[in-house]
Image (spheres, rainbow, N blue to C red):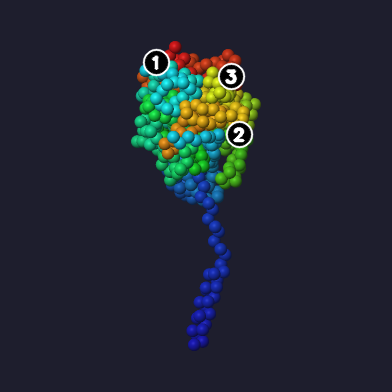
Amino acid sequence: MKRILALLAVLLAVVLVATTAAPVAAQAPSRSYLLVAQNKIPNNIEQQVAAIGGTVERVIPQIGVVVVSSSNPNFKAQAAGIKGIQSALPNVSLQWIDPGHREAVTPDQFGNPPASGDDDFFFDLQWGHDAVDAPEAWAAGARGAGVRVAVLDDGIDSDHPDLAPNFNAALSTSFIPGQTYEYAVPGDVFSHGTHVAGTIAAADNGFGTIGVAPEAEIVMIKVLDSFTGSGSFEGVAAGIVYAADIDADIINMSLGATVWRSGFFDEDTGEFVTAREVAELVNMLGRATRYAYQNGTVIIASAGNEANDGDHDADLLHLPSDLPHVISISATGPVGWAVDPTTSLDNLASYSNYGQSVIDFAAPGGDFIYPGEEECVVAGLLRPCWVFDLVFSTGSAGSYYWSAGTSMAAPHASGVAALIISANGGDMKPQHVERDLRHSADDLGKPGNDDAYGMGRVNAGNYFK
């Protein structure tokens, strides 16, 4: 019995030691990193990454980028030492779209809104088409046929009756984990990507609205989360490369984020992104835009909605509009168009970024500064008069809505570019498209490059005069 009791005592001591041992350290959260190669990606990168506690999630060989996840707190420093790797960076996620001001609606020769006489019953709400003289281009036979436009955004309502005729589902894709290219928020009509796509290429089908280039093809490349509007540097870069690889004639990026060249805090991780890392992230995205440009794709992006003066706010950088080979678009709009349809459509929008060094062209983006709640009726819709100064286009669940922003200006410019490319047989070099946009634009400010309008507000009709 004594021997049994002694054995039990030993076993109890073992249990007590096991239960009072030092606790295991909590696993560090897994984070996403970008490894940017000096030239080409090292052949054995998977093994080298694994050796320091990382997993390769995606490779973008066209621009020498490897996307890695790791819970190793020292991963970034250790990965920077891999031979052939130029930099190891945090794969920062940013808020790329701003909901802005929105108002919902559930519902051979061409004239201009608001009295076009067109059978697309909401076309008379689209004053932006009048501003860029889209009907005059249509009358000349240009409608966007043969042009592929890749929309990098938060998804699309691909079944929308105005979009389905021009939508290419086979090429559309998503770079947001767990979400397809469709807009993913049930019951929400405010799909940013659907609105943008409709401005570019809603079909002229006797229903709803008409896109600036109503026969262009739309491909949705989802790079932003439908619920948050956020996305990673990796996703945007991968989307640009993918668009180039599927021979998109135009990339429309109605998205943007302002970062500080001197560095900023990553809201997701709370860590500081240094000035050197900002420069390297910008260089990485610049590789993607150069790749697309060199492969024959025109890149058009919104200039941003912060009313920043790009000529004097030296520490601010707006992405992707400030990247190489990206055509940056400021926003214009009327004040009181529903009250007086002859009013100017070309005021610089109150929110639009500006500056000769950052703006290439202007296009209709809408504004919301008409005073008061006076009501007006246009195309059978009763709303406060200021609402009609916004841009009207397609929304999710077969709906339509108004919105304002440089996000709305970029697709007007993309539509005009599509008309120009279409008139040239569906194939043009990016530098020739930019040249023709410049030659056909309305020079609204001082001669030449201008703070508000760059080289002018785009105009499709002028190209055919």
Quick one: label 3, few (<14), some, or many (20+) residues within 10 Å?
A: many
Residue at 52% across / 34% down in the picture? 103
For the residue marked with disc 1, what is the amino acid? Ala
Which residue is tagged 1?
Answer: 140
The residue mark sitting in front, 2 or 1, is: 1
Inspect this view and state whether residue 347 appears.
yes
Q: Which residue is mark 2?
A: 261
As helix, strand or loop, the secondary structure at mark 3 comes to loop
**Mark 2 → mark 3, Cα distance in angstroms:** 24 Å
Q: Callout 2, which amino acid? A: Arg
Q: Which is nearer the eye, 453 or 82?
A: 453
- Residue 229 falls left or right of residue 109: right
- Measure the alpha-carbon separation of dots 2 and 1: 46 Å
Relative vertical location of residue 122 with respect to residue 112 in this rendering, above or below = below
In the image, 18 versus 354, the foreground residue is 354
From the image, which quarter does the C terminus lie in?
top left
Marked residue nearer the N-terminal end (2 or 3): 2
Q: Residue at x 52, y 73 (%)?
A: 15
Residue 450 badge: 3
| Residue beneath the point at 59% across and 40% down | 273
State left or right for residue 252 relative to residue 311: left
> In terms of secondary structure, where does tag 2 sit?
loop
